[in-house]
Every structure is written in structure tokens, then in C-alpha cells.
Image (cartoon, helix red, strand yellow):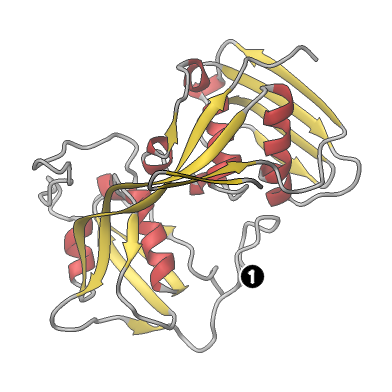
Amino acid sequence: MRLWILGFLLVWVVGAQSGAKFEAVSVKPRAECPDGGGPRFGIGVSPGYLSVACQTVDFLIRLAYLANGRDPLFVSPRIYTQAIQGSPRWLSSEHYAVNAKTEGPQNRETMLGPMMRVLLEDRFRLRVHRETREAAVYELTTGRGGTKLAAAKQEGCADFDMDHPEPPAGTHFCGVMIRSRRPGGAPVTFYGATMADLARGLTRLLDREVIDRTGLAGVFDIRLELSTSDMFPLVPRASSGTDGALSAADPQGLTIFGAVDKLGLKLTPAKGTVEILVIDHVERPSKN
């Protein structure tokens, strides 16, 4: 990894750091996706095989470079789109099917992370680098009256495992946002979560990155009461104010900001340093 200082920006070249790569790869264009595709559509992983039925290259880049091979639901439709610069339009409009075999067994996170990065660099001639820039963020801080957070229960929780997407019976994954699909207002819960876990979860629901400034250590069981529109932020909401902050008013009567306030925490618009993925070069895939 080579390092440059460019003015006040720290820029570093991103390459696939794992030595593992797919033994055989097929990439074919798809005219359209059944049911419109979607973040979880058609991604199949077995110990030696990866199948992507119909996805955009933009999604695969976000999955491989920004979510580091984590479950597609970790790829926020807002913040991760904003975190990529220099994308040609076809990256988010054209769909592809990808089938790849590994030489030996590999886990899901490795195949969708470092091995997918190698695939994109080989077949799409993708070249990227990362930059740190000043941007609009939300700071997560403690309220004046102190927090109302509940310490995590002693029985604890299970570490998240991409290869086993269901937690052990009677427990939950630690620090992972669990969303209810109940109509109207519904809870979002984090078990065994740090403040960094909460900040990452809130980032997925908002229009900018959330940075933890609470200074709170330890793990907590956290419950937020949110509206359905806040829990599933697939459609960008109108902004208010000159800094682009989301309006605190929610037509369903529930807001992320109000739910955070009830925990004795606060979300405040601010300026902060964020990481941006910059696409230097990309081509439509070479023939199989």
C-alpha cells in the first residue's frame, strides 16, 4: 500500500489485500432483474462457489470495498452511495450475473470482500483509492441530564457470523441492528452494543455518517422506537436548513432524533472527517 500526502488530504491506494482469488470466473450482462433485483437478490455462497444472479457493479463495489464483504443489508442505500465518487452512470444501471469457483473452501465474508475486490479489479479493470475529506456528519453525544441506557444483560450475546446468519437459539447477535417489520411505529433493538455499534446503525438510517462523541465505554441493550419510514430509508427525504440536515418533523410522529433524545443522547449536525472511495478507472467486463 503506497501513501501520499496531497495538501490536507490523506490518500491511499486500495488493493485487494488477501492472497485468495477465484479459480474460475464467469461474468455476463443481464438485460433486467426479476422483481427489480435488490440488495439481497440472487446472492448465493457455498464453501467453494459464489453466485450473483443479477446485480449492478455499483452494488458489488459497495459490498466489497465499503461493507468489506458483510451481509448486503449492511450496505446503506444512502451513505454508501454518497461515499463513492467518480462513478460512471452505467455502474448503477447495468446488471450482471457472476459465477465464480474457489480453489478451496472460503467463507462468505472472504468471497464477498477481498476476493470480490480481486474479481472487480481483474474483470472490470477497477482502480480505486480512498481519501479522507471534511464533510457534513452527525455527532452522537450525551444529553445534559445524562443517559438512560441499560447495561447489557449478563447472559450476553453471540458474535455476528456471516456463515451462520441466524444467532444461536435464545440469544441475539452482539451490536447488530434488529429491525421489526411491524406496521407503523416499531422498535429497533441493539443487544450488547457499544456506542460505536449504535453510531454505525444510525448511519444506515440517516443521510450522513454518525460519529460517536459520547466517550461512553461498555456495552448496552438499546431500544429505539422509530417510524416505518425511518426504519426503511430507501427513499431520500426532504432536507431542511442550509446545511442539508434532515427535518426533525416526521409525518408519522416518530423521529430518529426524538428516539435518540429519549435515551439521554443527542444527534447534532456538524463537520467531520469521513472516508470516500474514489473510482479512478473502470471498464465494462472483459469477455469470459
Task: Quarter of the image for the C terminus: give it.
Answer: top right
Q: Which residue matches tag 1?
A: 168
Instruction: Name the residue rendered at 62%, 47% in the picture.
Output: 69
Work out whether residue 41 can be spotted.
no
Relative to 278, is 57 above or below? above
- Going by the image, does 65 lie left or right of 273? right
Residue 184 percent coordinates (x, y): 24, 50
Q: Position of residue 65 (x, y in %)?
A: 58, 42
Q: Nearer the viewer, residue 282 or 227?
A: 282
- Relative image position of residue 262 (x, y in whole percent): 19, 72
Describe residue 50's horizontal placement relative to residue 10 as left or right. Answer: right
Q: Amino acid at mark 1?
A: Pro
Q: To which quarter of the image does residue 220 belong? A: bottom left
Asked whether, in this view, residue 2 is left or right of residue 175, the answer is: right
Viewer-closest of 273 and 55: 273
Asked if residue 170 is positioned above or below residue 241 in the image, the reply reads below
Q: Residue placed at 68% from the left, 50% from the top?
A: 109
